[in-house]
Structure formats: structure tokens, C-alpha cells
Amino acid sequence: FGVLGVGAGASAAPVHVKVAIYMLSLGKLDLDKATVPADFYLTFDCDATCPGIDFEIMNGRVSGASKVDDQPNRKMYRIYAELRPHIDLRNFPFDHQTVSVVVEDKALEKGELLFEPELTKTGLDDGIALPGWTIRGWHAAVTDHPYPILGEDYSRYTFAIDVSKHAWNAFLKTLMPIVFIFLIVTFSYVIPVEKTDNRLSAATAALIGSVMFHVAITNQNPPLGYLTLADKVMLVVYGFLFLTIAYNVCIYELVQRKQEDKARAIHGAVRFKLIAGAPIVFAALFWLLSR
């Protein structure tokens, strides 16, 4: 980004530079590539003559830039960049993400240049939106970023936008079908023992449908090395369906052996407790997993 370097050499004392970002627009957040296009103004206000600021976007690639204001103690740029946010999908589909712009000088260390956040000139344009996400707010901060191998320490400015999925929409689009599958199998326990084969067929079909649905929601995300909330919920559903199939196989075997009275006694003792308790247990596990 050297074409935007400006000013004279750094003084003996560090120059304090107030940094502001005004975000104009954001493109689609691509989870597979972990990228999001951004268009924003970047402003540097120096407490003295600006040193030779040769900044770079540490978590992205600048695709275009133009100088808007060029004064001895003020530099302003219009930046088009492809940002690379850190994507954490552990709480998918109720995940929260942070889209950040991280600015650091290429050559001037902390002893020569100190960034400071300029909050009065920082913010989001009124019409800004991130497709598929709700913007919750933003924050800006400056930290020291050391490079131990080089023995250097740089001032780093970070402007972060907090975004999240709308909880109800995420539930409807991702988890609602599996909730209905769970409830249908649960209420199938009202079927009498004489029709256990029907209940067994329903549970088997539900298991196949759950696997296919799990594959579909997994394909929405890039390959991950950890389980998401949706994966954990599906594991709970798999466990419930496996136990349901095992239970119905046992009842079916008793019926085939002409032990209907024993089968009715077992089924009578289990079904209403399961119908009442299974949704509560499922809701409690969902709450625990989402924490």
C-alpha cells in the first residue's frame, strides 16, 4: 500500500495519530471463503505533521483506494477492501460474528507512531446492511501488537462491527423441521402395542429424514474442525431416535412371542411419561447446549 505513503520522516517522540473509520457499505459475508467486501473512509488526524504513514489492512486485501484529503496533519482515504473476518460457527445457527478492519503501519513502530481511536468521527452509514445478518453495533480500540521474532512493537487500530443472525429466523430456517420430527416421533407413542410396527416405521423414517436434514444444514457451512450447536442438537435427536427404535423393536419382539400383556404393561408405564417428559428434556438439553 506504499503508494499512499505521505509526509516527512518520524520525529524523535512518537506522533499521536487519531484514527477514524466511517463504514459506507458491506457486501455479502461469504462463510466458505471467510471474506466480506467493504467500502469505507479511513482518516488519520495527527497531533503534528503526519509522518510517512504507510498503512496496511492487516486482516484483508485492499482492492482500491483514493486519497480524499491531503493536509500536513490530516490524511483521508476512500478504501475498497476485501476483509477476512475470523469466523466462529460454534453457535450456528445462532452465531455472532465480528467484521473488523485492522490497521497497522508497515514501518513505523510504537516509538514513532501511536494510534488513538477517534470515536467522534467513527461510525456506520445510516443505510448500511449486511445481507442475512443483523448489525448489533460497533466498537473501536487501539492495542500494542508485538512481533517477538523481529523485536518490534507496533500500534494497531481495530474497528469492529458486531453482527448476528436473527434468532427467530435462524430457528425457523434451521431447527424447526427437526423439532417437528422430534415431536411426531414422541407423540407416536400413543399408538397401541398392536401397531408397534407402524411406530417402528415412523421412527425409522424419522431417522433417515434427520440424517438427510443434517447433511443439508451442514452444507450451509464450510468444513469445520468442531461441532456446531446444530450438530449437538442433531446428536441428541439421533440418540432419542435410536432409543425409540430399540424400544419399539423390543415391544415388537414381545408381541411376536405372544407376550402382549407384558408388552402392554411396559408400554403403558412408558408412553405417557415419555410424551410428557421428552419435550421438557429436549428443551433443557437445547438450553444447556446453547450456553
Image (cartoon, rainbow, N blue to C red):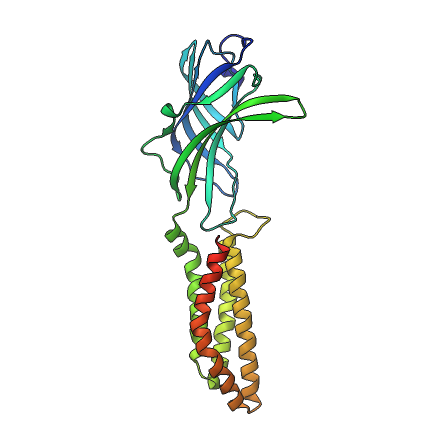
Please tell me which residue is depicted at 50% across the width and 86% down the height of the picture: 265
Given residues 15 and 169, the one toward you in this image is 15
Q: Residue 102 in the image: x percent, y percent?
A: 50, 28
> Farthest right residue?
149
Residue 273 position (above or below residue 225): below
- What residue is rendered at 55% in x and 72% in y? 243
Q: Quadrant of residue 72?
A: top left
Q: Is residue 147 above or below residue 227?
A: above
What percent of the width, then of the height, locates residue 180?
A: 42, 65
- Picture coordinates of residue 287, whole percent (x, y): 46, 57
Q: Nearer the viewer, residue 5 or 260?
A: 260
Residue 121 sits above or below residue 240 on the image: above
Residue in view at x 66 percent, y 22 percent: 150
Q: Residue furthest front?
A: 13
Residue that sits furthest to the left in the current view: 126
- What residue is at 44 percent from the left and 76 percent from the top? 188
